[in-house]
Image: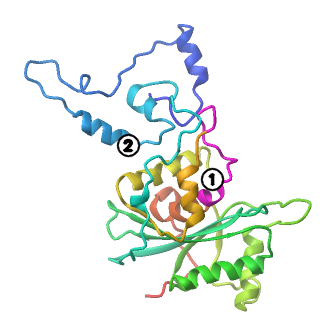
Amino acid sequence: MTPIGVPCDWLKRMVESGQVSETVAPLNESNMTPEFIGAVPLMTQKEIDDLAANYLSIDRDSRIRGDWDSGIPMEGRIFDQFSSDHISDQACSIKGEYRFGIGIDHGSDAGSQVAILVAVDISDPKDVFVYVLDEYIAGAETAEVHARGIMRMIERNNLSINQITRWTGDRAHGGTRFGGKMSNKILMSGFAHVLGYPQGKLPFYIRTAFKPRFSVYYTCQAIHERMVKKQFQIFPKCKTLIKSLKHWALKSNGGLDTMSEHKHTIDGMRYAIMPLIDQAYKLPTASKIQLRR
């Protein structure tokens, strides 16, 4: 086993007390070389280093060396493979089956109500490419204000609501004593008012994000792999999200900082991308959305 993704302190204590035996097999060139004369390594050090880059910094040392702890300092970046190479305004080319998604994170503080627009080229299931096209950033406003802002984001990317394959929003935000309550249902009512539809007749549905235990870790790992494989591109106009990708860091105990100011845009991005690239978050078989070809 590799102690990642879940708390393993209980097992570490059992090992230290002698209740459970431990065998550690670091992934290195020596351990990957068969024990006969003239044998060559099954993996070179470069191949091992390339494999290590696919893992999040939070568990890289555990996966490669078998460490119980990551050894990453508290300022360690989570998306440490994200760089300027991933930032480009080069237009994406639609090669085949192409889907658009919007991920929404609810909040009432400044910059905490977020919508992220993404495009995913799934023409080759083994080579899925993710484009992050645009962002909508706001604070405590009415549902109508948010709806208009998101519509402007869609339109400035030469799209229509009929082309959005999947809308995914966070669980309801209760707001503060000063207001700011927001949910998918409230936002849909705002869209209905702005677009002139009767309540309940909106031609799309904002689905609640699938958030099983450890989903933040799992989805960040999936997006990180796209970055390492050069299958991730973000447009320069996503200024807040780019800042978040550059600065979202680990907590002092090595865990993911789920209370960081950078999490709002990260969450919106995760909600937008994951239903389009992972079967666990797969699209519903029945949908009210009619794609325009």
Q: Is residue 247 left or right of residue 2?
A: right
Depicted 51 relative to depicted 230: above or below: above
Pinpoint residue 230: horizontal percent, then vertical percent.
35, 58
Residue plotted at (42% across, 42% down): 55
Can you see residue 163? yes
Q: How is the image coloured?
A: rainbow
Q: Residue furthest bottom?
A: 196
Residue plotted at (17% across, 23% down): 34
Q: Nearer the viewer, residue 189 or 51?
A: 51
Q: Are marks 1 and 2 in contact (CB under 8 Å)?
A: no
Residue plotted at (35% across, 24% down): 26
Residue plotted at (57% across, 65% down): 239
Name the image quarter holding the C terminus: bottom left
Q: What residue is pinned by disc 1?
A: 211
Name the image quarter holding the N terminus: top left
- The answer for how far apart the CA atoms under marks 1 and 2 are is 26 Å
| Among the two numbered marks 1 and 2 on one chain, the one whose residue lies closer to the N terminus | 2
Q: Nearer the viewer, residue 182 or 139?
A: 139
Q: Nearer the viewer, residue 229 or 235?
A: 235
Residue type highlighted by circle 2: Ala
- Magenta extent: 251-267
Q: What residue is pinned by disc 2?
A: 53
Residue type highlighted by circle 1: Lys
Residue at disc 2, secondary structure: helix
Instruction: Classify mark 1: residues with Cα within 10 Å, few (<14), some (14-19) or many (20+).
Output: few
Residue at disc 1, secondary structure: loop
